[in-house]
Image (cartoon, rainbow, N blue to C red):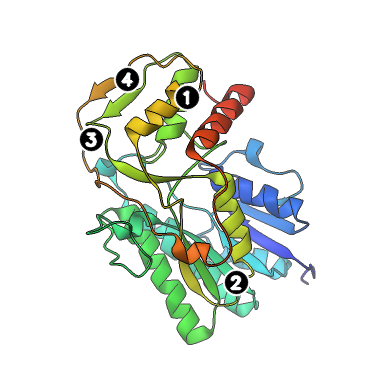
Amino acid sequence: MKNKQEKSVLVTGGCGFIGSHVVDRLISDGYIVVVLDDLSTGYMDNLNQGAILYQGDVSDKSFVDKIFEQHEFSYVIHEATKINTNVLHEKPIYDLKGSAHSTIILAENCIKHNVKNFVFASSVAVYGRPKSLPVAEDDLTSPIYSYGIAKYTAESYLKYFSTYYGLKYQILRYANVFGPRQPIYGEVGVIAIFTDRIINGESLTIYGDGEHQRDYIYVSDVVEFTVRSMEFNTSSVYNVGRGIPVTVNEIFFEFQSSGLQCGEALKELERYGEIGNFYSSVNRAFDTGWSPKITLGKGIQKTIDYFKKHKYCE
């Protein structure tokens, strides 16, 4: 028999970087939160003690089905993903399982159990190398790496389930999210990597000329939009970023301004697979009444303070 719970939310990946912050916010707002995480990249230390944890694989259908049978969720927020750390050694099946396969399993359960809204953490990686900037939600999606392909496949299945089965969804294409609890691996973790190295007295490395632009957004701003989106009435797709292009050189300058000893940056050759410049149009998100509150400099300082306090960097 199900536990009848008002304001109950399932958060996959709730022990991970972004997911754990989402869980903290939901519990603070009075929601009953169930976390599903296999702890392959998440950490128990990230788990809010007010949450209920099921440790397992979100792409394991029988496991997920049992969780839905035991709880009556109002919302599902799918943050779980597989992190690829090297574009030269991609694992398409691994990515497909982590994004698309798991999304299908969750979506089918949402339909069966009348979940109000499915919030999917996608990525701006679905755009690939854009032909013009900033990139809006209706622009061409042409992912060039396995991670982005898998995310876009998952998005397509959500639209399929919406068209034919009435599933309500919110697809959130996160830009380069940074902040406390971010791991120091991955292709988009330059702020976390810089923080780790500078705290440990190591030199910072800039690849190429450092002028590649990205759209960096602090994690609390992402959490704010993610939680808000649960109550949106119409299925839609949103870019979730600041919409402001930032270069690695500008990030290095912010670290120099933080009061820590940076020294001169080491210069290395451009890395293979660089996608070029990217930043997103966030007008659609702005139209919902949301806007980012944390500046790049303030976000970097908050990240440094957290890493130092928690001795996150070893």
The residue that mark 4 highlights is: 265
Above or below, 152 relative to 145:
below
Residue 121 image point, x, y percent: 49, 58
The residue that mark 1 highlights is: 196
Q: CA distance from mark 4 to mark 3?
A: 16 Å
Picture residue at 38% right of the left edge, 41% below the top? 188
Look at the numbered disc 4 and give the secondary structure of its residue. Answer: loop
In this view, the mark in front (2 or 1)? 2
The residue that mark 3 highlights is: 271
Question: Residue 267 vs residue 218: left or right?
Answer: left
Residue 92 image point, x, y percent: 31, 54
Above or below, 172 relative to 89:
below
| Observer able to see residue 55 | no
Image quadrant of residue 83?
Answer: top left
Residue type at numbered disc 2: Phe
Residue type at numbered disc 1: Asp
Question: Residue 130 vs residue 4: left or right?
Answer: left
Q: CA distance from mark 3 to mark 2?
A: 40 Å
Image quadrant of residue 11?
Answer: bottom right
Indicate which disc residue 232 carries. 2
Residue type at numbered disc 4: Ala
